[in-house]
Image (tube, rainbow, N blue to C red):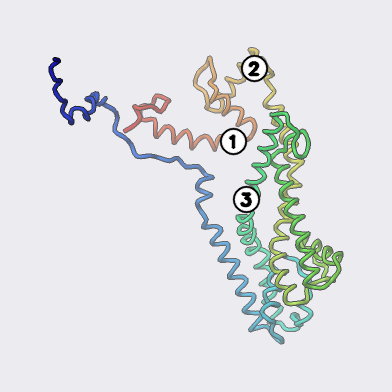
Amino acid sequence: MFARRPERNALLDNAQPPADPPTPTRPQLNHFHSISISDLDASDRSPQCYAALLVLAYFVLGVLYYSYLAAPEKFTLIDALYFTVVTITTVGYGDVNGDYKLVDTSQDKLFTALFVLLGVGIIGAAVGVVLSAILDREDELAERLSRQQTTETVRRRPSLLGKKALSPAQAKCVVSAAQLVLVLLGGTLIFERLEHVSLLTAFYWCCVSVTTVGYGDVAPETFAGKAFACVFLLVGTVLMAKSLGDIAGLPLEARRKRLEKKVLEQYGDHLDGEEFAEILRYAHSQGLCDSATSCSKTEFVLSMLLKLDKIDKDDIRPCVQAFDHLDSDHSGRLDAGDVL
């Protein structure tokens, strides 16, 4: 008979093999998250808040004065709000002025003159800040559209608007134009329903309004129409201005691309001695390179960014100073020896 095998201790069976002695390492540091200007700009909403408060104060001032202090006849609340919006958007139909005989008293003339200057100047900029913050998503959508078009072109798939990928400026124009068309169509249908006019008259009013021409021959007369106009004018005029700005930027971007292509392709596919000497000379003149026999990729990229006017020396200098402060051993590189 075989001898009975002694039972193992349960603690030994469950015990883990001895761990290797820990290797000495540097103490663990807290997680550090770097920041950029875009990060700070996205997190700082104070300009939008101040602008929104300024716009609100302007509207309150206009509504209170024209509703309670205007002479000889006080406005209704909706007319006071409507008149304030027409003023701040510079549409200026002139319909409310005539209805309430606004220019018949010196008091109203003086207040309205100052009110217009304040609205067109300071408050107009504040409205732009507020609505631009709301429309920032348009730029994100345009950027995604441009990236999608580029990806489809690389994969040799037909894009939505042709075989050529959309540039960021072109994508912005597409998004702005689409938004403006939707606003005009929606405004036409709503104004036609509220004011009981023809679709052509409603479309005419929308176009005259968003372009801030404001002839005054067609204007809202009902309470609902004026309330709708208050929203439509604020949104439509900003969208129209942004669309015109995006369209105006197209030829400028095309010219910029042509110039950048010439700068990037100036050395061709092969480097000769004169070109190499010029690269070193330019990098040295800008304080980017210390070597007399070579130029690193980083130094070349910075040189090209300077030539493309993407950055200037004033942009580089503070970055170099920040690096020098961190480079405690003055080795020209950030390494573990610079960690204190």
> Nearer the observer, disc 3 or disc 1?
3
Q: Is residue 137 left or right of residue 252?
A: left
Give x and y (percent) for residue 40.
50, 48
Q: Decide: is 255 above or below 89.
A: above
Q: Is residue 34 above or below residue 197?
A: above
Location of residue 59 by image quarter: bottom right
Q: Residues within 10 Å of mark 3 (few under 14, many from 20)?
A: few
Q: Earlier in the sequence, mark 3 or mark 2?
A: 3
Callout 2 crowding tier (Cα within 10 Å): few <14, some 14–19, many ≥20: some
Q: Of the residues shown, which amino acid type is indicated by label 2?
A: Glu
Q: Is residue 212 above or below residue 137?
A: below
* Residue receiving disc 2: 275
Identify which residue is drawn at 65% across, 47% down. Answer: 139
Q: Amino acid at mark 1?
A: Ile
Disc 2, SS: helix
Please tell me whether residue 114 is drawn above or below residue 136 in the rendered image: below
Looking at this view, is 222 or 251 the one in front? 222
User: Tag 2 or tag 1, which sits nearer the N-term?
Assistant: 2
Nearest the eye: 300 or 239: 239
Disc 1 marks which residue?
311
On the image, numbered disc 3 is attached to which residue? 137
What's the residue type where badge 3 is placed? Arg
Q: What is the distance, in whole Å, between disc 3 and disc 2 at their CAs?
A: 44 Å
